[in-house]
Image (cartoon, rainbow, N blue to C red):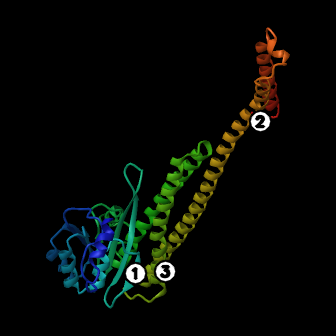
Amino acid sequence: MPEGISKTSEKSGLPPGTLIHIGKVKTEKVKITAINYNVDDFNQFECSLEECLQFKDSNKFYWINIDGLQNTEVIGEVGKQLNLHPLLLEDILNTNQRPKVEEFDNYLFLTLKMLGISKKGDKIISEQVSFVLGNNWLLSFQEQQGDVFDVIRTRLRENKGIIRKKGTDYLLYSLIDAIVDNYFFVTEYFSDKIEILEEQILHNPSQESLQKIQKLKRLLMNFRKSIIPLREAVASLQKYNVELIKESTFRYLRDVYEHLIHLSDSLEAQRDMLASIMDLYLSGISNKMNEVMKVLTIIATIFIPLTFIAGVYGMNFENMPELHWKFGYFIIWGIMIIVAVIMINYFKRKKWL
């Protein structure tokens, strides 16, 4: 039984908000890093949970990132210190959670999938990332170390653009935008795979090709499960009056929403292409079968007159003069060869061979 399913079954009958990590353990140790910044200052450091949570009385903006979700005590302590809802913490620990956004009294919760291509370029890596946005702070929860946020950290460190002039709502937008931009690399991965697969099927459709089609269909389906709910979540941020997000940031969120619309269109186009490739595969298999049947039919057609001749002279009648010819055996062989050659030449002229 898959790990996610078995751990989900462990929660059966338990009260809502029970903290159980659902999913694969992708890192052995929980790592907590903090970034505090304003227009004039920037600091990045690793810290213990108690040290990181001192931001509540600070006049700076804080981004606290937690790598590793298997230690439910750490997640529970974060929730206790910041008075986070137990159901929110439960969603953070459930790595099979559908992308969504929820607004609470003093904070905003958003969870989504961070996708990327492996170093070998042979598979898609998926990781759940959750954000909790407060008035001057932002929490991010990741399954493991390593993400697509290095460019955001560099912009903060080097004070590039307006990111340090804005609040944590703009930081949240920047992180979402970095994740969504990485989705475009995933669509390129699918496009390349589909193009290669199409060439293979055109030249030689095989059982291996069918397996690749099915694998790509599953990956596209999982990709769709990451994009469509996130599109709805970003749309809801613009639709409802979320006090923690400033009006100026909504303009940037609309840009993210447009990117998600574009990704959805690309995804639908790739699904259609994959369906066309499936039809192409079936047509290729059918054509290969027709070619085989054609060859067998031609061979059978050539042997029909030869079988007739052999059958006639295989009869055991006494008054068959050809049976007593001195060169009868060689003459019959010559006739059969001539008939076969004539038929083969005829088939070639008709371009059946």
| Amino acid at pointer 3 | Ala
Q: What element carries label 2?
A: loop
Specify which label sits upstream in the sequence, 1 or 3. 1
> Which quadrant of the rendered structure holds the C terminus?
top right
Q: Nearer the viewer, residue 10 or 139?
A: 10
> Which quadrant of the rendered structure holds the N terminus?
bottom left
Near mark 2 (Cα within 10 A), the count class, few <14, some 14-19 or many ≥20, is: few
**Distance from the alpha carbon under mark 1 to that under mark 3:** 10 Å
Residue 173 picture location, percent across and down: 40, 74
| Amino acid at pointer 1 | Val
| Amino acid at pointer 2 | Trp
Q: Residue tagged by mark 2?
A: 352
Marks 1,2: beta carbons within 8 A = no
> Which corner quadrant of the image does residue 332 belong to?
top right
Residue 129 visible from this viewpoint = yes
Residue 132 picture location, percent across and down: 31, 79
Specify which label sits upstream in the sequence, 1 or 2. 1
Q: Nearer the viewer, residue 253 or 85?
A: 85
Residue 140 visible from this viewpoint = no
On the picture, is 16 further left or further right than 289? Answer: left
Residue 17 picture location, percent across and down: 27, 84
Q: Which mark is residue 235?
A: 3
